Amino acid sequence: MTAVPDSTLGRASDFMLAVPNAPEACGETSAPTTSTTLMMALGDAVAVALLESRGFTAFDFKTFHPGGALGAALASVSDIMHTGDAVPLIGRDAPMSDVLIEMTTKSFGCAGILDDDGRLDGIITDGDLRRHMGDELVHRSASEVMTRGPRTGAPDMLAADALRLMTAGEPKIIQLFIIDSNGRPAGILHLHDLLRVGLK
């Protein structure tokens, strides 16, 4: 890249990219100002053109640039979600006394409620407990207290998309169950997990 095509650099180049030979913004000293901005703009244009021509995707970028804010935005939910025994799950017919134990033990402030086939049927959160607070709460079943049709995510979605899903609309949520293609829980994601990897 040069503003002087007939220069030594220009003549020696296999592919010469010419930028305008514009005067520098710093007229007193002719310190590089305008020329460096032109170089950056042309360099960015070349980089984007190469990305598009090679079919380079966000997932490719994640492989080569896993750190920092960009890496965090390109992380997959499966990279950071909690799995296995850490996920608070219980059957829909379980008494609320058992649900409370599950919620307290797993420390996510919620429990996923499963149907007879192991699919996510609903969710019970701290907010549900407050709405149903009363002497009979512990004697009710999970299905009587749960909220049906909770927002869910998929393991292969980007963490940034999960954050938007959790914070868009009302009510905003701080836990997101991640389900597989059969509707069964594969993990759980907490808002703090997204903040921890650098998403905001």
Image (spheres, helix red, strand yellow):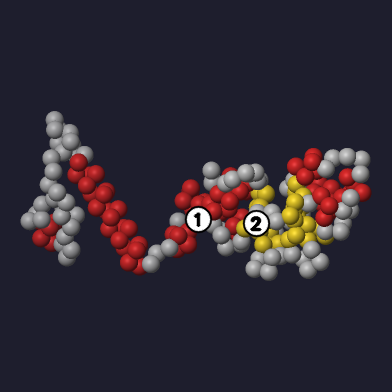
Whether 168 is drawn above or below 6: the answer is above
Furthest residue toward left: 6
Answer yes or no: is residue 53 visible.
Answer: yes
Query: What amino acid is at disc 1?
Result: Leu
Mark 2 Cα-neighbour bin, 10 Å: few <14, some 14–19, many ≥20:
some
Q: Quadrant of the N terminus?
A: bottom left
Report the Cα–Cα distance between label 2 and label 1: 19 Å
For image coordinates 75% across by 42% down, the residue present is 127
Mark identifier at residue 5: none
Report the residue marked by disc 1. 74
Instruction: Give the image location of residue 114, x and y in percent.
Output: 78, 61
Give how far across and how far down residue 170 sits, in percent.
62, 44
Question: 184 or 122, which is in the foreground?
Answer: 122
Residue 13 on image: x %, y %: 15, 62
Residue 108 place in picture, x, y as percent: 73, 48
Between 123 and 58, the one nearer to me in the picture:
123
Question: Which kind of residue does numbered mark 2 sit on?
Answer: Thr
Q: Quadrant of residue 159?
A: bottom right
Does residue 10 appear left or right of residue 166 in this picture?
A: left
Mark 2 and mark 1 lie on one chain; the one further toward the N terminus is 1
Q: Is residue 188 visible?
A: no
Q: Which image quadrant for residue 186?
A: bottom right
State whether residue 37 is above or below residue 90: above
- Quadrant of residue 60 in the image? bottom left
Q: Secondary structure at mark 2?
A: strand
Q: Residue at x 83, y 58 (%)?
A: 92
Q: Which mark is residue 152?
A: 2
Q: Is residue 23 left or right of residue 143?
A: left
Crowd rating for badge 1 (residues with CA inside 10 Å; few <14, some 14–19, many 20+): many
